[in-house]
Amino acid sequence: MSHKMQAFEIAGVDALQLGKEFGTPLYVYDTAKMESQYKRLKKAFKGSKHKINYACKALTNINVLRFFRDLGSGLDTVSIQEVEIGLKAGFKPEDIIYTPNGVSIEEIKKAVKLGVRINIDNLSILEQFGSIYGGKYPVCIRLNPHIMAGGNVKISVGHIDSKFGISIHQTRHLERLVKSLGIKVEGLHMHTGSDILDVDVFLKGAELLLDVARDFPDLQYIDFGSGFKVAYKPEDIATDVEELGSKMTKMFNAFCKEYGRELEIEFEPGKFLVSEAGYFLCQVNVIKQTTATVFAGVDTGMNHFIRPMFYDAYHHITNVSNTNGRKRVYTVVGYICETDTFASDRQINEITEGDLLCFHNAGAYCFTMSNNYNSRFKPAEVLVHKGKAHLVTKRQTLEDVLSNQIEVEL
Ligand SMILES: *Cc1c(COP(=O)(O)O)cnc(C)c1O
């Protein structure tokens, strides 16, 4: 090569160095990107009283939760375990909203004991809840506005066939339960899916929710969920949160005037806050040329990084070891013993065995969806903050993989 290769940096740290120091496969997160996304959203909604609750199922490392707590964020949780991690991370109970789906009344009772805000998404549990607590413990109601939205059917949760939320066509029944049992409804909520590009889809949902809100006099907040799309491909367009913020705050403020009281807009983004902050580093084990394809086989698989196989997600790839080599066409595959393709027919700077590759947008729904299939260890996680790389999850060992197994005499 005639000129020196340009180093690929993550938050100012050389990725090659990170690979060397912590090994691969490795997840790396940039706190500065999380912070700028959080502040961008805050700014977009500055026209209304508002609150952002980080949806921590996207990336549940406790250091990430602490980081968002320090920024002033609340927390959106979907299981009692996430609630417990949130409390451990130092969130106050009132800053945690618990939005489970399909859980038992027993789990909801635990959430009451822990004092967090509770979002109920079906009439049966709401009726049981009302019979036990009446108006003593306020609740939020998750409604389903029946809007088809989202980048993939697996992440579209607001449509007519979806299991999520109480249908807006059941509000009559909902009101009947609320009235008869004296339930205090402090919030209304919707979350229609992930990867929603169109600002008008959000606004349409908001309009439907606000229509229902008129009939609930005790509201403190209205939670519009999430689903903001971020750019995965270099040419991708993302949700225009500034446009959404300006239109939505206008609509919301007009509603509050009519309602007679200032309410709070809430959002609970996961992907928007952490997706672009994450990078997944792996090493190329083998270049395998078949009659039809050039495969680059890497030292990880869909057990560590499931989005390409599960959602047909595109993740951009950089060859960290050769950032300005000539582009060649590769199919990048994992080492799991079934088809686990990360990218097909992708142009990547020429790859040699031993090179370090980096998948972009690996902050959301990546590490948290990893598993031990093929008895592989889960990757390590590193958080880069102010130029310093901190190991925040160690790589697993064989003891970890076997830790809950019990050997018995048969
Ligand atoms: C998963 C989830 C979110 C976060 O969705 P993103 O697309 O990651 O922003 C928000 N709210 C609820 C209830 C969720 O289940």
Image (cartoon, helix red, strand yellow):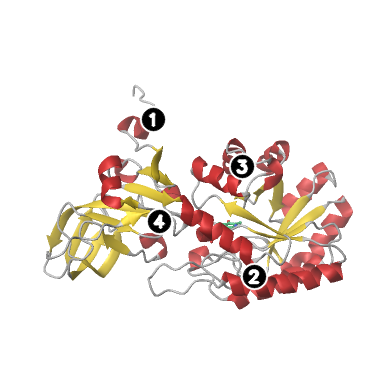
The residue that appears at 85% across and 57% down in the rendered structure is 218
Real-space Cα separation, disc 4 to disc 1, in angstroms:
31 Å
Q: Position of residue 232 (x, y in %)?
A: 41, 67
Amino acid tagged 3: Val
226 to the left or right of 247: left
Ligand 1's image quarter is bottom right
> Given contact means CB atoms under 8 Å apart, are the residues at marks 2 and 1 in contact?
no
Whether residue 95 is visible, yes or no, is yes
Real-space Cα separation, disc 3 to disc 4, in angstroms:
24 Å
The residue that appears at 53% across and 60% down in the rendered structure is 37
- Numbered disc 3: secondary structure: helix
Looking at marks 3 and 4 on the same chain, the residue that comes earlier in the sequence is marked by 3
Real-space Cα separation, disc 2 to disc 1, in angstroms:
50 Å
Q: Which one is nearer the viewer's eye here, 404 or 37?
A: 37
Looking at marks 4 and 1 on the same chain, the residue that comes earlier in the sequence is marked by 4
Does the residue tagged 4 have its C-beta within 8 Å of any atom of ligand 1? no
> Up-down: is 249 above or below 300?
below
Amino acid tagged 2: Gly
65 to the left or right of 277: right
The N terminus sits in image quarter: bottom left
Residue 245 bears which disc, if any? Answer: 2
Name the image quarter holding residue 198.
bottom right
- Numbered disc 4: secondary structure: loop
- Between circles 4 and 1, the one closer to the viewer is 4
- Between circles 3 and 1, the one closer to the viewer is 3
User: Where is mark 4, residue-wise?
Assistant: 362
How many labels sit on residues? Answer: 4
Question: Label 3: few (<14), some or many (≥20) within 10 Å?
Answer: many
The residue that appears at 42% across and 50% down in the rendered structure is 29
Amino acid tagged 4: Ala
Amino acid tagged 1: Gln
